[in-house]
Image: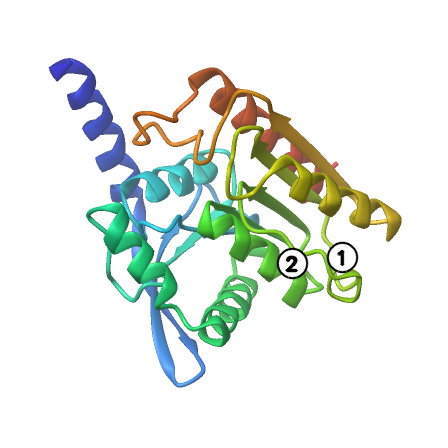
Amino acid sequence: MKLAALLLLASTVAFAASGKDVSYQSGDETVHAMLFTPAGKGPFPGIIVVHEWWGLNDWVKEQAGKLADLGYVALAIDLYRGKVAKDPEEAHELMRGVPADRADRDLRAAFGFLKAQNNVKPDRIGGIGWCMGGGYALDLALAEPRLAADVINYGHLATDSAALGRIQAPILGLFGGQDRGITPDDVHKFEAQMKQLNKKVEIVIYPDAGHAFENPNNKEGYRAHDAADAWQRTVKFLAANLKDK
């Protein structure tokens, strides 16, 4: 166990060292984020990475680092203004404390920040999020028609046809069949409405998985096999939609 813990720590530190703290304007506020950049000259596709209800913690930074290793400029944004939850009660409190209009503004501003980077392809910017961040990834697709791809990992869903009609990005949705908050019925309704609107959508429901099954810190709900499959699907989807064909 000690060796495994050390390896995990080393991995996390390596990813954190490859990223840098950046800031961008969101209205009259300054938002901090972590920017992870691939090796080489670029320009590269970009991805906005949205954290779970815990905040911008090491696991989310690790995901951004993994995406950078795959050739994406990954911007891991901080919707909590520097706060990271220590337990579910605090996470719930922080999540409920984010004003919806501020979050939407932060997401749109993050897109603008990435688009302005010299090493980012402005027409190849996607989004990805988990849990709370999965819902905000969908919100980003609703708000930003120039988004080129979007990955929703067990995030809240919209069902209003007028809202969904604004989505231009292809969507990959990954969900747990045992999720009691975002149920398979909710997911099927979302998928059906997207297809009725002729939107590009790919939905995968893992029958035995619950909420947050991709995060190994979720000791009771983590499902390694499903998480590995979800990651491979994510890698394939992002490459198909954001990289040169």
* Quarter of the figure with residue 213: top left
With 193 as the anchor, is 209 left or right in this view? left
Residue labelled with disc 2: 141
Residue at (58% x, 28% y) in the render: 177
Residue at (32% x, 48% y) in the render: 19
Give the amino acid at mark 2.
Ala
Quarter that holds the N terminus: top left
With 53 as the anchor, is 6 left or right in this view? left
Q: Secondary structure at mark 1?
A: loop
* Quarter of the figure with residue 171: top right
- Camera-nearest residue between 117 and 131: 131
- Within 10 angstroms of label 2, few (less than 14), some, or many (20 or more) residues? many
* Quarter of the figure with residue 143: bottom right
Alpha carbon separation for disc pair 2 and 1? 7 Å
Residue 244 seen in this snapshot: no
Quarter that holds the C terminus: top right
Q: Is residue 39 above or below residue 85?
A: above
Residue at (45% x, 40% y) in the render: 68
- Camera-nearest residue between 202 and 240: 202
Residue labelled with disc 1: 168
Q: Tags 2 and 1 in contact by the CB under 8 Å rule? A: yes
- Camera-nearest residue between 11 and 40: 11
Residue 232's tag is none
User: How many callouts does the rendering have?
Assistant: 2
